[in-house]
Image: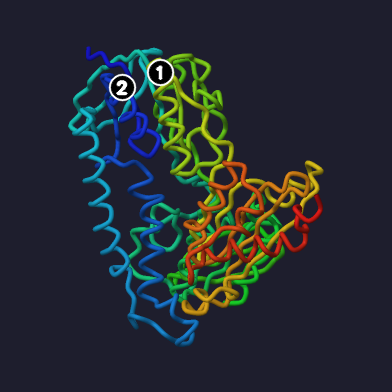
Amino acid sequence: MDQFDLLVVGSGPAGRRGAIQAAKLGKKVLVVEQGKRVGGVSVHTGTIPSKTLRETALNLSGWRERGFYGRAYRVKQEISAEDLRRRLLITLDHEVEVLEHQFARNRVQHIRGKASFVDPQTMQIVKDDGEVVTVSAASILLAVGTKPFRPDYMPFDNKTVLDSDELLEIEELPRSMVVIGAGVIGIEYATIFSALDTQVTLLDPKSTMLDFIDKEIVEDFIYQLRDRNMKLLLGQKAEKVERLPNGKVELTLDNGRHITTDMVLFAAGRMGATDTLNLEAAGLEADSRGRLSVNPETFATKVPHIFAAGDVVGFPSLASTSMEQGRIAARVAVGAIAKEPPKYFPYGIYAVPEISTCGLSEEEVKERHIPYECGIARFRETSRGHIMGLDTGLLKMIFSLKTRRLLGVHIVGEGATELVHIGQAVLNLKGTVEYFVENTFNYPTLAEAYKIAGLDAWNRMGDIKSEL
């Protein structure tokens, strides 16, 4: 039986970052991945594919140039599913190559197969060829990620009724699509296909969407979606989904409405991929969604030497935060010091348009009874926005009236997931409104919106120096 310092199950963001961190500390590490190639859900069906699909769709459709050349403008007149897949495969090959090189140079061993617990410190690995390998480790990190939630009442057929993993394998682009689930994944794919001129209907039983995002940003986002003729059926539920003889799909809603469409994407949640781990043998159990409960500071489960990180532990389920969780878990697992990460991290939603946020929302500031003021800039107020032909885009900052410190930054529009990092840095370094007023930003850039929003807030708050 092989003995390791750390056994990592899963090679997604949490698994690979944890494995490499432990290896850099001189530990003997083994990574087990059940997929055909390393990378996990993030590389093969989640983060990287969806963002590559988004970029390809925006480039080929000419979406970013339509402000100048009109809504009929397209870089490629006939866009096929193969056009989207070609760039995707190139990107995935590169990601896998980089990851395999990282494992090789850090001397991280990895094996393909399905792992399951024999006892709390031993796992059995069934390889693709049927060979069974048994390994033990001083510590174990579970970074198995998630898989799409697939309820029995949905007639999945991998062609007209699909989950978010299957969507990447479609053979042709649909003329119409219903997306069930107005969460992050559903919204991202709904807006990507809308940018490809597919007629999209977004359906969700809840009457609101993205409740963890600042309400003003969500309202602006919804306005943009409706402005381009996306249908948002919030507070409505599909009671019946039926494939028709003509190849289409009919949905019957709880209010009696019938919708006929070419394709249905079911994106209402994901499940932790823990069902094959035989958790009982390790003294662990998952919740109803397959997720594991951990200490939020160390990522240790109730079994002290077994850790879990990434999407399998639940919110925020971001590749970026999963990497940091994996790194912290690995350091704790091998007995190294692990510093607590900064309080605020950026949350990115790669929809069309992008949304990104860091810090407190206006609703959270109100709940805490903090006296505050907001500063807002619209991208059309910047020269760079004019150059890019942007009619939309909003940057919002929230400041404390008492300390003048930045409390939150919220952006919707082109480049939001890049721009947010300026606000993140100021937020975690406890900067004030004066930083944005007194500093120089490159001109012309979208980052200049920080200056505009800072001045907007400063004008409302008054110059503190003149009051002293």
Q: Which residue is mark 2?
A: 25
Categorize mark 2 by other alpha carbons within 10 Å: few (<14), some (14-19), many (20+).
some
Residue closest to the eye, 374 or 10: 374
Give percent across and percent down for residue 437: 63, 59
Marks 2 and 1 in Cβ contact (< 8 Å): yes
**Image side of residue 159 versus residue 93, left or right:** right
Q: Residue at x 36, y 60 (%)?
A: 52
Query: What count of labels does the image hold?
Result: 2
Instruction: Return the residue at label 1.
Output: 336
Quarter of the image where the N terminus is located: top left
Give the residue displayed 31% in from the left and 42% down from the top.
39
Left or right: 447, with 217 as reference point: left
Give the image location of residue 328, x and y in percent.
44, 27
Specify the quadrant of the image occupied by residue 327: top left
Q: Earlier in the sequence, mark 2 or mark 1?
A: 2
Disc 2 marks a residue whose amino acid type is: Leu
